[in-house]
Image (tube, helix red, strand yellow):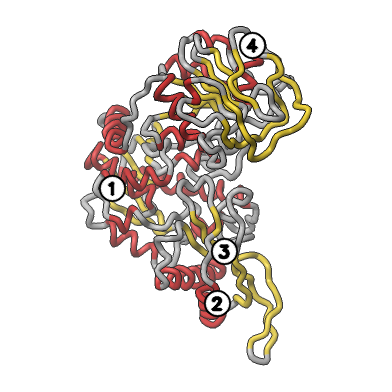
Amino acid sequence: MILVVDFGGQYNQLIARRVRNLNVYCEVVPYNKALKSIDEKKPQGIIFTGGPNSVYEEKAPQIEKEIFERNIPILGLCYGMQIMAHTLGGEVKPAKQREFGKTILNIKDSLIFNGIPNENYVWMSHVDRVEKLPEGFETIANTDNCPIAAMQNREKKLYALQFHPEVNHSQFGNEMLKNFITEVCKVEQNWNMSNYAKMAIEEVKNKVGDGKVLLALSGGVDSSVTAALLSKAVGSKLTCIFVDHGLMRKNEGDEVEAAFKNSGMNFIRVDAEDRFLNKLKGVTDPEAKRKAIGEEFIRVFEDEGRKIKSVDFLAQGTIYPDIIESGLGDAAVIKSHHNVGGLPEVVDFKDLVEPLKMLFKDEVRNLGRELGLPDYLVDRQPFPGPGLGIRVIGEVTKDKLDILRDADYIFREELEKAGLGKEINQYFAVLTNNRTVGVMGDFRTYDYTLALRAVKTTDFMTADWARIPYEILDKVSNRIVNEVNNINRIVYDITSKPPATIEWE
């Protein structure tokens, strides 16, 4: 395996995606737990990520010098290069000229650049740079504005790049990562979903033992794959509880029940709409909504678990982007996910079981196919745990939810009719808290503005807005304002991720 040490950059986990795309397993750990994790997991290679700090600042993330004495190959990227140089006696200073964006890189002979042209494009994003090499290092690349754009200590297998090979803008970035993993670390490219399934099932068996497991089943991709994996691991010791919180899409509660009720799993449907709406009364802040929904989820499971008696573990379909966006180590919190940041301090279970927490969405889908789940479940549209609670901006009420359900159904129906359902990775409607003046017939209206959102993505860490043909948007708009009460204006979100997130809240 490869261990990725995170120094607080917001999108550093793209590195993990690149490594896994090379069929090599990796995990990400915060820098302040790196040494302990290295000694426990014994990786074959280590990658230091970028980060927003300057290594010479008093409160900047640092790394133990002992890490460099473990005789494990290390690749430092951006801040990772600077922390390597700083820790080993080099010198890092503010650059005379900042570098942001595409830059021409000139390289020298090195294993890390094996098979790569001497001149190529890379993506720079830095205000500091290495001015003086640590003892035993040599320069292996430069740009016009950065004399030491890459360095190596061939004997100790320490390599560092000032740029970001993990982003698509770096012309041969993927090849550089592959060279480090296969040429320097000598790691075999044999990790796949079949191996992961076997490993995850064994881990669940060992953790649960003779205990009973209660699964939060939403019917979405993540919880469905979790259910299939847990069923293979613990069989009849698994009970799946579907909490109908009243925040589902149109007809979705009945569809989930139909899909799982006769599946051979222990399936329980709980009508908890009133409980959740009461918790959300007067709540307008999105973080407060997520935490309120997350806590009520746990309380419902606790109540149901007491009825079943002797439930030991709570299982959740937490996936890697949930953890990343909720804040990994010192990384900034983008938004708390209900099954990460929303957990209350006291939970009436021995522990959590989260077999998907190290997987990205596309990996979860592949795992689902490996476990034998049908395509209609595996390819289902993503739906956030807090449901429509975070697609109604402002206070959540039953009336607003019903308005949104009808509008969202029309949008999704028209895209599927147009054959765009599989081409666009996620699409939904958002009921904003803005009211605008309109006119219907001879009457003035003052109703809600509805926003439509559709994106294309592979890993849900980055996304581009979908270019839906105008005639389809026109049809959607006409249907919604004519068929759904209390909406008189439709807007289409044309923002990519970043800078926006896919969801509005």
Q: Which of 17 and 36 is in front in this view?
A: 17
SS at circle 4:
loop
Q: Mark 4 or mark 1, which is nearer the start of the sequence? A: 4
| Number of marks in picture | 4
Q: Give the labeled residue for mark 1.
A: 369
Mark in front: 1 vs 2: 2
Q: Mark 2 or mark 4, which is nearer the start of the sequence? A: 4
Q: Give the labeled residue for mark 3.
A: 430
Please name the amino acid that badge 1 sits on. Arg
Q: Give the labeled residue for mark 2.
A: 474
Q: Are marks 2 and 3 in contact (CB under 8 Å)?
A: no
Q: How far apart are marks 3 and 4 (CA)?
A: 53 Å
Mark in front: 3 vs 1: 1
Where's residue 67, x and y in %? 53, 13
Where's residue 49, x and y in %? 56, 28
Mark 2 neighbour density, 10 Å: few (under 14) some (14–19) many (20 or more): few
Q: How far apart are marks 4 and 2 (CA)?
A: 62 Å
Q: Residue at x 29, y 41 (%)?
A: 229
Q: Mark 4 or mark 3, which is nearer the start of the sequence? A: 4
In the depicted structure, whether residue 451 falls above or below residue 170: below
SS at circle 2:
helix
Where's residue 62, x and y in %? 63, 19
Q: Which residue is drawn at 33% across and 45% down?
A: 366
Left or right: where does residue 245 sit relative to residue 305? right
In the depicted structure, whether residue 204 falls above or below residue 361: above
Q: Are marks 1 and 4 in contact (CB under 8 Å)?
A: no
Please name the amino acid that badge 2 sits on. Asp
Q: Mark 3 or mark 2, which is nearer the start of the sequence? A: 3
